[in-house]
């Protein structure tokens, strides 16, 4: 049976001139209790040693931690302050626009201040990819676009993205941007397949957006199934992974990466070995039969 193409060792971030790895490492749990700067540095090095260059964080990550807001960014900033040479090895992505308890705020004044605050916490002069974390329905996309363009013009941000936006919200914001969006970050996993059928990935391919998949293991449910459907998806991934000598989580990453939209799974583990393991997905060979077998299990019914 003919195999689908292997993912490239590097790909472009949208239509920008930024090259990224086909896997990313996410830091939403970097500021968990007990994690210190030395622990964070080990994780950063583990990701880089695995060939991961795209590092994804957000100002809201670590909310409820020691200082309440921005703890994950501050932790990474401490690592970069101690080892400045690491900055040149990574494509740094962060997100903003969530403001508890409003809950969202993308007004010009707040969004501009959020970008500046992220720069200070991260100890960097430029953010490679700045993403609006969740849409603020009360912010006009033209105002958001203007604020983001101003940040780019000032050299604070290199390129732009969104997270958790609908197809229509992406179209609206992109319409008002001079520099088009480079990335979209929806939730995608073998347990969360809406993007394959609701037009999000089709739009990404049409606009040249790189899809960054958050929670590619279904929030851990893929590793510890609780329902018959989840167990069936896990079983199919185990069969395919077993045939290729990889774990269930690696098979899940590989399944996403086989899609023609160029999905980049964000590995959320804070375990160095699990981070390194993710790179095995680049060598997986997928047939159409196996890929659709996972989709059918995820749908819980046969395809028409």
Image: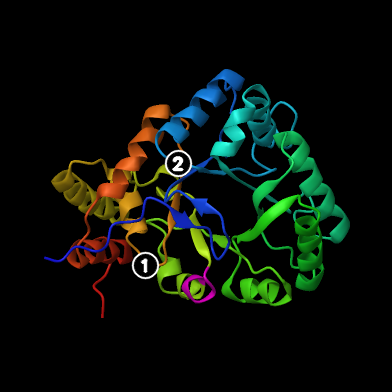
Residue bearing mark 1: 260
Query: What main secondary structure does the magenta stretch of the protein show?
Result: helix
The image quadrant where one finds the C terminus is bottom left
* Near-viewer residue (101 or 75): 75
**Magenta extent:** 204-208
Q: Secondary structure at mark 2?
A: loop
Out of 82 and 97, give the one closest to the viewer. 82
Residue name at image x 21 percent, y 54 percent: 236
Residue at 72% of width from left, 72% of height from top?
Answer: 178
For mark 1, does the 10 Å Cα neighbourhood hold few (<14), some (14 to 19), or many (20 or more) residues?
few
Q: Nearer the viewer, residue 78 or 232?
A: 78
- Please give the label number shown on residue 122: none
> Is residue 121 in view from this perspective?
yes
* Residue 220 drawn at (x, y percent): 41, 43
Q: Secondary structure at mark 1?
A: loop
Q: Is residue 205 magenta?
A: yes
Q: Which quadrant of the figure has residue 286?
A: bottom left
- Name the residue beneath numbered marker 2: 52
Q: Are circles 2 and 1 on residues that touch, CB within 8 Å?
A: no
């Amino acid at each position: 049976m003919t195999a689908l193409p292997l993912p490239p060792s590097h790909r472009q971030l949208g239509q920008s001139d930024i090259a990224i790895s086909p896997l990313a490492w996410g830091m939403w749990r970097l500021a968990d209790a007990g994690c210190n700067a030395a622990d964070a540095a080990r994780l950063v090095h583990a990701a880089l040693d695995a060939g991961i260059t795209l590092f994804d964080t957000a100002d809201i990550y670590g909310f409820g931690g020691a200082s309440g807001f921005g703890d994950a960014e501050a932790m990474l900033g401490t690592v970069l302050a101690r080892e400045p040479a690491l900055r040149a090895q990574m494509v740094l992505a962060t997100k903003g626009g969530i403001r508890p308890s409003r809950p969202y705020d993308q007004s010009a004044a707040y969004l501009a201040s959020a970008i500046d605050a992220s720069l200070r916490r991260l100890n960097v002069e430029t953010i490679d990819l700045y993403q609006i974390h969740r849409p603020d329905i009360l912010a006009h996309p033209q105002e958001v676009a203007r604020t983001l363009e101003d940040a780019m013009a000032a050299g604070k941000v290199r390129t732009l993205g969104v997270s958790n936006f609908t197809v229509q919200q992406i179209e609206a914001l992109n319409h008002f941007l001079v520099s088009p969006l480079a990335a979209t970050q929806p939730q995608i996993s073998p347990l969360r397949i809406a993007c394959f059928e609701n037009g999000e990935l089709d739009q990404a391919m049409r606009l040249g957006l790189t899809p960054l998949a958050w929670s590619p293991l279904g929030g851990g449910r893929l590793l510890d199934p609780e329902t018959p459907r989840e167990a069936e998806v896990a079983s199919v991934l185990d069969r395919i992974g077993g045939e290729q000598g990889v774990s269930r989580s690696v098979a899940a990453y590989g399944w996403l990466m086989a899609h023609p939209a160029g999905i980049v799974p964000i590995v959320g583990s804070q375990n160095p070995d699990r981070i390194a393991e993710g790179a095995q997905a680049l060598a997986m060979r997928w047939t159409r039969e196996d890929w659709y077998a996972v989709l059918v299990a995820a749908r819980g019914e046969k395809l028409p």
